[in-house]
Image: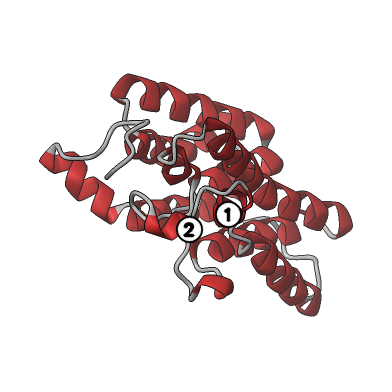
Amino acid sequence: MPEIVTPASLLGLTAVLAYLLGSIPFGLVITRAMGLGDLRQIGSGNIGATNVLRTGNKKAALATLVFDAAKGGVAVLIAGWLMGRDAAQVAGLAAFLGHLFPVWLGFRGGKGVATFLGILLALNWQVGLLVCVTWLAAARISRISSVGALVAAASAPLWIAVLGDWALMALVLVLAALIFVRHASNIRRILAGTESKIGARKG
């Protein structure tokens, strides 16, 4: 963790605002705006980009990926610019929790992968870029989105260790652990050989 230099009151306000930003369900908003129906009634019911892709609309899926990543990245960048790296990490965690547990959807949100990538890119672009490449490679080789997500999450602490940005380690370990928890059902299907492939409309 970085040295805590920002007053607790400001860190608390940062956490609340970042949570609210992170809790915006862009996948749901985008699919409704494009007339694709209620995303929670499609495929896995998840609000992330992978499930948006199951509508068959690649533009909607890409937009969801970008906006879900951006809300994490923007929260980090604004907090870091106004206060410092301690506030940036608080904002990243809060935005991530907002995506996973959005107040607007009864605390039933996404699995956090795009938001995780956006947070990493904003905190350390080199780590973020390496994790993105790992994610794309694993997803391409396996043709399973959840495999890409899990491999990317697992790789993040390793890339941090390689680059020596130890102040990020605690936060990234927490975020990666939450991604694995949110992918528990996917892990069971991967082990059973029943996890859906990228581009499948069901699963």
Q: Earlier in the sequence, mark 1 or mark 2?
A: 1
In the displayed structure, 60 sits above or below 32; it is: above
Please identify the quadrant where the N terminus is shown.
Answer: bottom right
Q: Please, what secondary structure does the residue beneath circle 2 have?
A: loop
Give the x, y percent position of residue 157.
47, 41
Q: Is residue 2 left or right of residue 108?
A: right
In this view, the residue farthest toward the left is: 192
Q: Is residue 119 visible?
A: no
Residue under label 1? 32
Residue 30 x/y as whole percent: 61, 49
- Position of 134 with respect to 88 (left or right) is left
Circles 1 and 2: CB distance less than 8 Å? yes
Marking on residue 114: none
Task: Find residue 38 and name its label.
Answer: 2
- At a point 60% along the width and 34% down the height, the residue shown is 128
Which amino acid, by three-letter code, is at mark 2? Answer: Asp
CA gap between label 1 and label 2 equals 6 Å
Q: Is residue 77 visible?
A: yes
Front one among 18 and 195:
195
Pick the front one: 171 or 185: 185
- Identify which residue, 21 or 96, lies in the foreground: 21
